[in-house]
Image (cartoon, grey):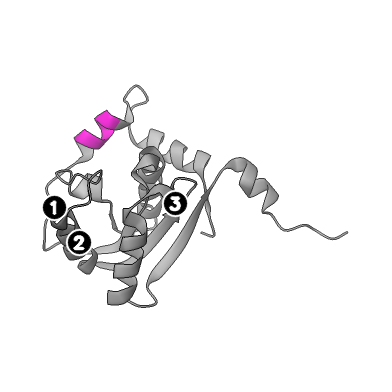
Amino acid sequence: MAYIKISEARAAARAAVPVQKRAGQILSEQARAFDAAERYDIFLSHSFDDAEIIYGVKKMIETLSLTVYVDWIEDAQLDRTKVTAKTAAVLRERMKTCSSLVYAHSANSPSSVWMPWELGYFDGIRPHQVWILPLVSDYDSEISRPISRR
């Protein structure tokens, strides 16, 4: 995957749950208690403003038989709207259970206070295991295609 179209991620999220449900309902129903013994292939770093898209990205990655940690699904008790020592400690422990980090870059990424921190921390504990995944609009992906020569 070089990038994921936002429309494809939204479609994957909507296919995973009934259409009439809102993102908030989905998140609260999908949330479960974190199992400290569980290991993940991927820690998905993202902006919570992209929740529906990220849910779709998670579902798309899982079709590749990879396990994905998303904090508001695995650790619903965390309040990511506030930067606290407790939240940082939990995220550090969770990152230690993951083999790699995928940085899902979107237009909302620059406003995230957590994404740069997650990226720096993870690169410190697992160098060379960090990947950037651009989330692009359909328009962006159309203009990013290579120009064919005739």
Query: Cα distance, mark 1 to mark 2?
Result: 9 Å
Q: What amino acid is labelled 1 in the image?
A: Phe
Mark 1, residues whose alpha carbon is within 10 Å: few (<14), some, or many (≥20)? some
Q: Which mark is residue 34?
A: 1
Quadrant position of residue 101: bottom left
- Label 1 sits on a secondary structure element that is loop
Q: Give x and y (percent) for residue 67.
A: 29, 58
Residue at image point 20% right, 64% down = 92
- The three-letter code of the residue at mark 3 reads Pro
Determine contact: label 1, label 2, CB under 8 Å.
yes
Rendered position, 143 above or below 30: below
Horizontal side of 6 relative to 14 (left or right) equals right
- When the figure is inspected, residue 2 is found, relative to residue 57, above or below; the finding is below
Magenta residue span = 24-28
Nearest the eye: 147 or 114: 114
Q: Which residue is mark 2?
A: 94
Label whose residue precedes the other's in the sequence (1 or 2): 1
**Residue corresponding to mark 3:** 110
The prevailing secondary structure element of the residues shown in magenta is helix
Q: What residue is at 34 percent from the left and 44 percent from the top?
A: 48
